[in-house]
Image: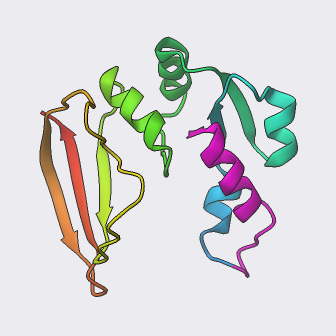
Amino acid sequence: MQWRRTFEMFASAWSARTAEDDPGAPFFNDSPKGVVSSSLDDAAVASLWANARSLGGYDADRIRAFADGYAGGVYISGSGTLVRALLADGLVDALHLFVYPVVRGSGARLFPEGNAESKLRLRSSEVYGNGVVHLGYVPA
């Protein structure tokens, strides 16, 4: 599931890629995709990327119904605005953060000041050889 802006970026980056181009392409291209957008309808999202449908504007009940249709859960990449809204509405079962060994000094923050507090409990962690740390959280 993605917010409209992230969906448009991912669609342009992934929709034409094949497994030969990138081993991750089948995951992104073959998976069903739900797009949270008040401006893109089903025809618009389907024209940008296969297996995509519009969920309309943000509506917690509609998103819950969409997620309940997938036994394996719903994957969200990027879409910080959507993640914050889902956390605030109690719709996140697990949060996986990847911390990269780079200090940027500026840019968008996942949790900006004024964001509602969300209590999390660390469930897993893994350090990769390139210095990236994967942190798996669940709601506390």
In the image: residue 69, left or right of residue 20: left
Region in magenta: 1-21
Residue 40 appears at what percent x and percent y? 77, 29
> Quick check: can you spot residue 138?
yes
Q: Is residue 136 magenta?
A: no
Residue 125 appears at what percent x and percent y? 17, 63
Q: Residue at x 63, y 34 (%)?
A: 34
In the image: residue 136, left or right of residue 50: left
Quadrant placement of the N terminus: top right
- Residue 135 lies, with reference to residue 131, above or below; the image says above
Query: In the displayed image of the protein, which residue is found farthest to the front?
Result: 106
Q: Residue at x 53, y 15 (%)?
A: 59
Q: Residue at x 27, y 31 (%)?
A: 115
Q: Residue at x 40, y 27 (%)?
A: 85
The image quadrant of residue 93 is: top left
The image quadrant of residue 27 is: bottom right
Residue 47 appears at what percent x and percent y? 88, 43
Quadrant placement of the C terminus: top left
Q: Nearer the viewer, residue 19 or 43?
A: 43
Q: Is residue 7 magenta?
A: yes
Query: In the displayed image of the protein, which residue is found farthest to the top?
Result: 61
- Residue 107 lies, with reference to residue 131, above or below; the image says above
The image quadrant of residue 90 is: top left
Rendered image coloring scheme = rainbow
> Quick check: can you spot residue 30?
no
| Number of dots carrying numbers | 0
Residue 104 appears at what percent x and percent y? 35, 70
Query: In the displayed image of the protein, which residue is found farthest to the bottom?
Result: 129
- Residue 15 lies, with reference to residue 95, above or below; the image says below
